[in-house]
Image (cartoon, rainbow, N blue to C red):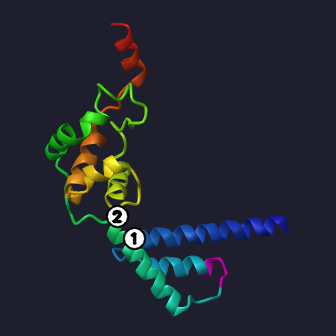
Amino acid sequence: MIRTSLVNGAIAIAVAAIVLSLSACTDEQPSTEDKVASRVESLGIESEPAPKLEAEAKTEVETLVDSKVITKDYIPSLVSGEKLVQNLCSQCHGDKIIPFVQSYPNIKGQKAGYILKQLRDFKSDERQDLYMQSVVKHLSDEDLQDVAAFYGTLKPLDLYNRTKEYYHQ
């Protein structure tokens, strides 16, 4: 009995591997709906989503994608990002002040996507900080992407050694 179930399991895995390898050979990619339907079917769930709920979910996802993720084929400019950082950001997030003011985050070397999300949240008032909100209020989304990309290319500041150097001068 155990041997039969192992053989059946091995056959199922082999069939799945063949199907996956054959699907990888084709240029046609299954849609997200097809992938979800296939997964639901493989789990043995026999239900169709209600059309109203499906439409609401689609609208919600489109809104989320439009406002948070998709950037209209813009390639961030590191030069512009560096200028913005020097003029707007370095007074609080610069090397000279970060080791001594713990309330200012050390964002050098942080992932650009994370910084961009935080900047967008400040701009949309989803994240509250009066100073940051006033700084980003008049910046375009391209400016925010430039700043995020620039910070993402920097080496993180070693706060321990920087503070130690300052106090031992």
User: Could you tell me which residue is drawn at 72 percent across and 71 percent down?
Assistant: 8
Residue 83 placement (x, y as % from top left): 15, 41
92 sits to left or right of 59 = left
Label 1: which residue? 64
Label 2: which residue? 69
41 sits to left or right of 103 = right
User: Could you tell me which residue is drawn at 19 percent across and 60 percent down?
Assistant: 74
Q: Which amino acid does label 1 sit on?
A: Leu
In the rendered image, the quadrant that contains the N terminus is bottom right
Q: Residues within 10 Å of mark 2 (few under 14, many from 20)?
A: few
**Residue 153 versus residue 62 in the image, above or below:** above
Q: What element does badge 2 sit on?
A: helix
48 sits to left or right of 169 = right
**Residue 40 versus residue 72 in the image, above or below:** below
Task: Name the N-terminal-most of marks 2 and 1.
Answer: 1
Mark 2 vs mark 1, CA separation in Å: 8 Å
Start-end of magenta stretch: 41-45
Q: Which amino acid does label 2 sit on?
A: Val
- The reply to whether callout 2 and callout 1 are in contact (CB within 8 Å) is yes
Residue 13 placement (x, y as % from top left): 62, 67
User: Could you tell me which residue is drawn at 34 percent across and 62 percent down?
Assistant: 124
Q: Quadrant of residue 105?
A: top left
